[in-house]
């Protein structure tokens, strides 16, 4: 008897990633052809790009019904992009991915296997990171702080390539950079079956990071403390 495939969304916000999208989209399409258990819908969200990156998405969209394009006329940030997605679409869950080609779409195959086993949150732990030593140290300290405050022990807390069961994600009260904390929010909302697996990190070829060293040093701590205060106050309860 034919059993219909479940739908999984792949959500990719982007800002001025035209050259990366030209490489990334064919890789994604090639990979999802190999996945038989799930039907992927590719949702690209142009967050105020000025390089006409959405033209690249439209080119592929014209030939592939799996692709959806949303456009923010001005840059509003990734959290707003995910809020827009959650408001417009309904699915069992979604994979988030950056458009910078630092995570290989081939890992979607492993995601599909873990999703089929009932994992509610799936995170990736980047190995052989292509960041500066200062960024690596700051990330290490940041992870230690999160564990100290939340007592949630994970190898990674802020994977750019991750899966979330929609049941544990709030559709309201997400603010500023709260998309970074979706793993913690999910666990506080009851997600129990968590998987973290290692991936190889690739260096950027085109473009530059939107969240550099200065922001990491001066904004990460107050940003997280503000998030943690709201978390404890129940702002993200389902």
Image (cartoon, rainbow, N blue to C red):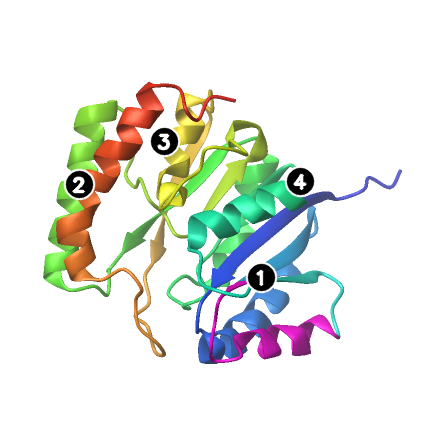
3D distance between C-alphas at marks 1 and 3: 24 Å
3D distance between C-alphas at marks 4 and 1: 16 Å
Mark with earlier residue (3, 2): 3
Give the image quarter of residue 117. Answer: top right
Q: Residues within 10 Å of mark 4 (few under 14, many from 20)?
A: some
Residue 184: give its label.
3
**Callout 3: helix, strand or loop?**
helix
**Viewer-proximal residue among 146 and 234:** 234
Expressed as whole percent of the image width and height from the top left, the position of residue 90 reads 68, 40
| Discs 2, 1 touching: Cβ within 8 Å | no
Mark nearer the viewer, 2 or 1: 2
| Discs 4, 1 touching: Cβ within 8 Å | no
Residue 221: give its label.
2
The residue singled out by tag 1 in the image is: 44
What span is colored magenta in the figure? 46-62
Q: Give me the residue at 30% from left, 72% from top.
A: 208
| Discs 4, 2 touching: Cβ within 8 Å | no
Expressed as whole percent of the image width and height from the top left, the position of residue 187 reads 41, 26
Q: Give me the residue at 74% from left, 74% from top.
A: 62
Q: Residues within 10 Å of mark 3 (few under 14, many from 20)?
A: some
Give the image quarter of residue 153. Answer: top left
Mark with earlier residue (1, 3): 1
The residue singled out by tag 4 in the image is: 91
Q: Is residue 110 left or right of residue 116?
A: left
**Callout 1: helix, strand or loop?**
strand
């Amino acid at each position: 008897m034919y059993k219909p495939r479940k739908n999984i969304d792949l959500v990719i916000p982007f800002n001025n990633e035209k050259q990366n999208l030209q490489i990334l989209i064919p890789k994604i399409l090639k990979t999802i052809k190999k996945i038989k258990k799930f039907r992927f819908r590719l949702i690209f969200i142009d967050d105020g790009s000025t390089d006409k990156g959405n033209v690249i998405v439209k080119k592929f969209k014209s030939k592939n019904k799996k692709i959806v394009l949303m456009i923010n006329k001005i840059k509003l940030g990734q959290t707003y992009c995910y809020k827009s997605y959650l408001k417009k679409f309904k699915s069992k869950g979604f994979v988030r991915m950056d458009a910078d080609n630092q995570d290989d779409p081939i890992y979607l195959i492993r995601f599909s296997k873990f999703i089929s086993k009932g994992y509610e949150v799936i995170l990736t732990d980047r190995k052989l990171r292509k960041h500066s030593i200062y960024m690596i140290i700051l990330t290490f300290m940041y992870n230690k702080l999160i564990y100290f405050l939340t007592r949630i022990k994970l190898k990674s807390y802020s994977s750019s390539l991750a899966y979330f069961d929609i049941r544990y994600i709030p559709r309201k009260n997400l603010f500023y950079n709260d998309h970074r904390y979706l793993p913690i929010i999910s666990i506080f909302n009851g997600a129990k079956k968590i998987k973290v697996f290692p991936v190889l990190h690739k260096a950027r070829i085109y473009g530059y990071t939107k969240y550099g060293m200065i922001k990491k040093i001066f904004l990460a701590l107050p940003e997280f403390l503000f998030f943690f205060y709201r978390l404890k106050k129940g702002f993200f309860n389902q």
